[in-house]
């Protein structure tokens, strides 16, 4: 007789670094990174000598928004999963 690997009566254990609270804290930190990158883009576009380096803050903004999107999808899946139970 094989044991059920995912019994119904047990809740999944979520590590502290993947808890909802830490996800919201991380999104707050990443929002600050996106704002910092946006300020860098604005400064690089208004200063002709920095125009060649606009890609650095642009990468910060793109990566920050990508990770925020990933975390939002994770939280949405977790929320929808809790509704279906």
Image (cartoon, rainbow, N blue to C red):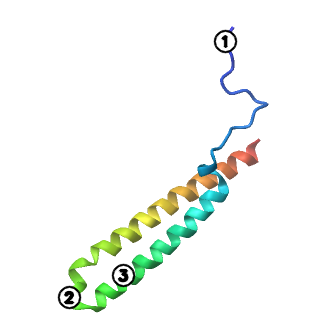
Residue 73 versus residue 52: which sits nearer the camera? 52
Nearer the observer: mark 1 or 3; the answer is 3
Q: Residue furthest top?
A: 1
**Considering the image in quadrants, where does the C terminus appear?**
top right
Mark 1–mark 3 Cα distance, whole angstroms, equals: 58 Å
Question: Which is nearer the N-term, disc 1 or disc 3?
Answer: 1
Answer left or right for 49 relative to 40.
left
Residue 45 versus residue 29: which sits nearer the camera? 29
Name the quadrant containing residue 12. Answer: top right
Marks 1 and 3 close (CB-CB < 8 Å): no
User: In this figure, which residue is indicated by the disc labeled 2?
Assistant: 49
User: In this figure, which residue is indicated by the disc labeled 3?
Assistant: 40
Mark 1 residue crowding within 10 angstroms, few (<14) / some (14–19) / many (20+)? few
Rendered residue at 63%/55% (across/down): 76
Rendered residue at 66%/49% (across/down): 78
Q: Residue furthest right?
A: 9
Name the quadrant containing residue 73. Answer: bottom right
Nearer the observer: mark 1 or 2; the answer is 2
Rendered residue at 59%/51% (across/down): 17
Residue 21 screen position, x and y as percent:
66, 58
> Circle 1 sits in a helix, a strand or a loop, which is it?
loop
Q: Is residue 3 above or below residue 39?
A: above
Residue 42 screen position, x and y as percent:
36, 86
Residue 56 screen position, x and y as percent:
30, 72
User: In this figure, which residue is indicated by the disc labeled 1?
Assistant: 2
> Circle 3 sits in a helix, a strand or a loop, which is it?
helix
Name the quadrant containing residue 22. Answer: bottom right
Mark 3 residue crowding within 10 angstroms, few (<14) / some (14–19) / many (20+)? many
**Considering the image in quadrants, where does the N terminus appear?**
top right
Q: Is residue 6 above or below residue 70?
A: above
> Circle 2 sits in a helix, a strand or a loop, which is it?
helix
């Amino acid at each position: 007789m094989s044991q059920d690997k995912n019994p119904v009566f047990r809740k999944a254990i979520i590590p502290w670094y993947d808890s909802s609270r830490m996800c919201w804290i991380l999104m707050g930190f990443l929002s600050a990174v996106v704002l910092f990158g946006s300020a860098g883009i604005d400064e690089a576009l208004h200063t002709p000598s920095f125009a060649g380096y606009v890609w650095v803050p642009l990468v910060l903004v793109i990566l920050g928004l990508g990770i925020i999107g990933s975390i939002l999808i994770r939280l949405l899946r977790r929320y929808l999963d809790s509704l279906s139970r």
